[in-house]
Amino acid sequence: MTGLLVALLGLLFFGTISSAEASQYCNFEAGKDEPAANDLCMAVSTYQNQSNNEHDLHVTIQVYRRQHSALGWTSIGIGNGMAHALTFIIYGDPKSSSGLTLSVRRAFGHWEPELFDEAVNKGRIRVQQLESTWNSTSGSVAQLSFICYSCDTGLDPDLDPLVSTTTDSQPWIWAKNDGQRLSDYSRGASLEMHSHKNGYGIFYVDMKHNLAPASEAQSVPVVHPAIKSIGASETKNTTTVAESVTPWQLSYTAKVSFHGFFMSLAFLLLLPAGVFAILSGSLKAFQHHWKVQVAGIACISVGMILGFLLRGFRMNTTHQWLGLATVVAVGTQAALGVSHHLRFLQIRRRTWMSHIHIHLGRGVLVSGYCSVFTGLVLHRAGIFQFVVTGAIVVSEVGWILVTILRARKGPEDSAGQKDTYQLLKEEVE
């Protein structure tokens, strides 16, 4: 049973290592730690279209607004410069119910780009908006995802050949305007020029890095705001992520997978196994309990280190705060467990530390389960991962509840199992 559970956890959290990793680029004004108005993060994955053998780009963009401002616009584009680039422009009012606008445009020089809709491109390159949301934080974060179908065709003579899936240095551009008050949010709205100071730039994406294998299911790429770049660079032809990873280093996807595996191994297997051991009624219950718990704490420590390597000390998600609180609770739980046992050996009975140790342990299990689920949500896991994790949790909680209820019938239940503390007394004596 234990081997099967470990295998399931490996399948859940290591399956992503062999899949393509989305390339990502974030631009925070002048390298500041916190985003300024209309700063952006983008992530892109490339999939081969099985119907025409061309390639589709799946893109997610996050735009940051200070104090829920509706001013300005933000854009990314594919090309060496503004002229002949295919540009994706985002704008909208976070206080409005109209949502976000994605305007696809092209320019023939350094002036306002023109709409590039299906009537213009005659359906050769099609852009489909998937989802758009405003998330309120200290300001607002706009997130929009879209697919650019056949973006590698280069069929339009007025556009640069858009995408090469064999290059490690695909040029992209970005631009923003911080101050324009738009009169409307239609796709053809008139746009003022980008800001001159920290208002535009170029970056390069390793398209080989984010090219998904044909067998991989298509999905929306996830933006990780604490990461400056993944498979991307601000200079051309520099060593890319895929080339710079030495044998002892881990890619971002591998770190995420290892973090999820070790934390899930602790919260879904080892810590519950420690509870099972102490409730088992075995003469070796205590020895099994503390050994398994130590192994669980070791896994949590490794997972925590990987978590900090992923995000640093920037705490901006529910998963991070819940995980940190759970780790602190585990440390407190371990200290209470040691103190409780040393005291128990002296007086041969439970103390207040014993009761806190027991109740805090139950809380740690619950918060650990919640941490795993919020991690799956943050990672945008598939339904299979949620179903398997849910089945494990339900099974474990059910077994623990049944065991506790049976133990409350007395020191010896209908199966002849003795209370663990009674057994511990006999063993000490």
Image (cartoon, helix red, strand yellow):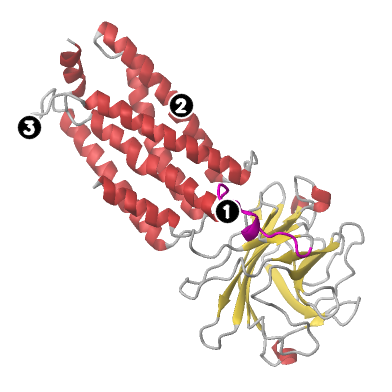
Q: Say the numbered circle drawn on residue 414.
A: 3
Among numbered discs 1 and 2, the one appearing first in the sequence: 1
> Which residue is drawn at the image coordinates 66% and 51% (left, top)?
227
Q: Amino acid at mark 2?
A: Gly
Q: Amino acid at mark 3?
A: Ser
In the rendered structure, which segment of residues is drawn in magenta?
236-252
Q: Image quadrant of residue 55?
A: bottom right
Q: Which numbered mark, 3 or 1, is in the foreground of this view? A: 1
Q: Residue at x 38, y 43 (%)?
A: 265
Q: In the drawing, what numbered circle is on residue 53?
A: none
155 magenta-colored:
no
The first of marks 3 and 2 along the sequence is 2
* SS state under label 1: loop
Distance (Cα) linking label 3 and label 2: 36 Å
Q: Which mark is residue 251?
A: 1
Quarter that holds the C terminus: top left
Dot 3: what SS?
A: loop
Q: Which residue is mark 2?
A: 331
Instruction: Using residue 373 as the reference point, say whether residue 207 is left or right of it.
Output: right
Residue in the picture at 62% in, 45% down: 311
- What's under tag 1, amino acid-wise? Ser
Most common secondary structure along the magenta stretch: loop
Residue 75, given in percent of the width and then of the height, sits at 77, 68
